[in-house]
Image: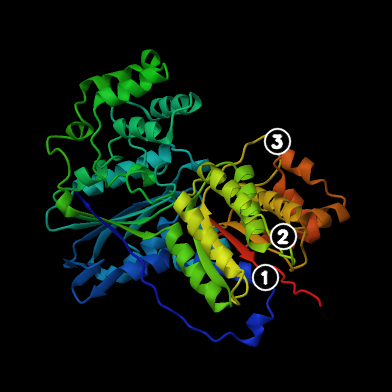
Amino acid sequence: MARVLSLSRCVSVQQPLRLAVRSMSLEQRAREVFAAAVEAVQPDRVVRQCLERSGNQLKVGGQSFKLHHNIHLVGFGKAVLGMAAEAERIVGEHLVRGVISVPYGIQETLKQHGKEQMLLSNGSRITVMEGAKHNLPDADAQRAAESIRQLASSLSDSDLLLVLISGGGSALLPAPVPPISLQEKQDVTRQLAAAGATIQELNTVRRSLSLLKGGGLAACSQPAQLVSLILSDVIGDPIDLIASGPTVQCEMWPEQVWAILERYRLSSSLPASVTEVLRQAGSQTARLGATGSADETRVLNAVIGSNGIALERAGRRARELGLRPLVLSPGVCGDVRSVARFYGLLARFACTPVTPGQSVPLPELADQVLQLGPEVGVESWDIMRTLKVLEDSRDETWGATCLLAGGEPTVQLTGKGRGGRNQELALRTGLELGEGLGAGGGQGPVFLSGGTDGQDGPTEAAGAVTDGGLAAEAQGQGLQTDSFLANNDSFTFFSRLMQGKRLLTPGLTGTNVMDVHVMLLPPPPTYTKSH
């Protein structure tokens, strides 16, 4: 089995809680925590933390590789340009050549956002190929994939292939098995998706029709040593799903693929080229050539950046800001309406005040949170652990708790407005907080949702910050929240609310490990009996 590492070098930074920190509002602290999460997974940073050069040795996660002008580099994904720039700085003269496939226009966009450190230097040995407009495979991306395949196929057993992978890599590495055309492959996967196929089923079919996915790139590169550095944008960091697993061996039999196609009644309407490939193939690895599958002892896959790593750093920053960090889960998913309800219930559980002679209905709230867990991708164990900490914090003097989570919820599109899942989640959660607690103005819980790539949907914002006073603020400005939600127009809503002050606008970050959710939960007011 190929070696898989998850790398994160943590440097603890202890700072005294200065008066300036104590005077910060909860909203300011939430923004600081989010910024720390994004900084922790910057492409250059994560590469620098996992790649270490010592003389003629390159160290990756405890493994050492000899350097003698034998490094070749390929990459594909939205964050790969910054990863490649840092990798080239580290290996220096030992890099022979490289090819990376990146989104169309990314170099110019990074320049406009002042991200020069993520650009290749003059005289770089790496060729940059842009493609996949609108995040869809196209002819430019296919030419890049062919260049990557040719480079990998030319290596010897004395070479080391450094593979850089990030989110968006699948669309930037299209290599259909001849005679299948790119359009034919896209048509098959599009029909499957429209028929309701799961992501696992889509990946099975997609990999069976690709030269490079499902371990194809690893097979092409043998007998060279292969080291892949992966910036994960998938819940749970499954390396066989990130960019469809080009460096992860995955045998698939034609019977599996036919079963999926027949399940969705597509087997009789396939292009002749797809039928030909499936009938001729034994397993995917046999189709890749006489060399068979890649020697997995020569493959090292390392996850160097993930949502979990971002949350870990966010938690340390929260502690520096005088907050009690509590990581819920890096795998929140499901419809934003359910996710907002879930966070609203957690806030009520943590912050509802207790008056003498009355008790908060904690068991009832806890049951509702647990029932929602499966809908939002959070395990019962994680919920029970979180509820225990929140209940205990009522009797302690820690101050506000910083609840941290990540993932990728979904939005049901019913309108044509401008927005994204983070802004809609913030809007819906703000309404939930007001309904359950009714506190605003920095007195009650504060919620932030932001995309780590800095762009939430087709907008200039990454997300938004909100609290229980949202509904009253909107009403005071004549903004009808229901209308904005029905039109999926959360960006317009937050742009008008308080002149856009609640928007989260870090700009393009150059990375992507899904979304980060930050909910600051102040302790509930306490009352004493009067005599």
Q: Which tag, 2 or 3, sits closer to the chain's start? A: 3
Q: Which mark is residue 26?
A: 1
- Nearest to viewer (mark 1 / mark 3): 1
The answer to whether mark 2 and mark 1 are in CB contact below 8 A is yes
Q: Residue at x 36, y 71 (%)?
A: 9
Label 2 packing within 10 angstroms: few (<14), some (14-19), many (20+): many
* Residue type, numbered disc 2: Asp
Looking at this view, is 75 or 202 the one in front? Answer: 202
Q: Which residue in the protein does label 3 denote?
A: 415
Coloured how? rainbow
The answer to whether mark 2 and mark 3 are in CB contact below 8 A is no
Label 1 packing within 10 angstroms: few (<14), some (14-19), many (20+): many
- Secondary-structure class at tag 2: strand
One can see residue 447 in this view: yes
Q: Which tag, 1 or 3, sits closer to the chain's start? A: 1
One can see residue 513 in this view: no
The spot of residue 158 in percent (x, y) is 12, 58
Q: Quadrant of the C terminus?
A: bottom right
Residues at marks 1 and 3, CA–CA distance in whole angstroms: 33 Å
The spot of residue 281 in percent (x, y) is 21, 25
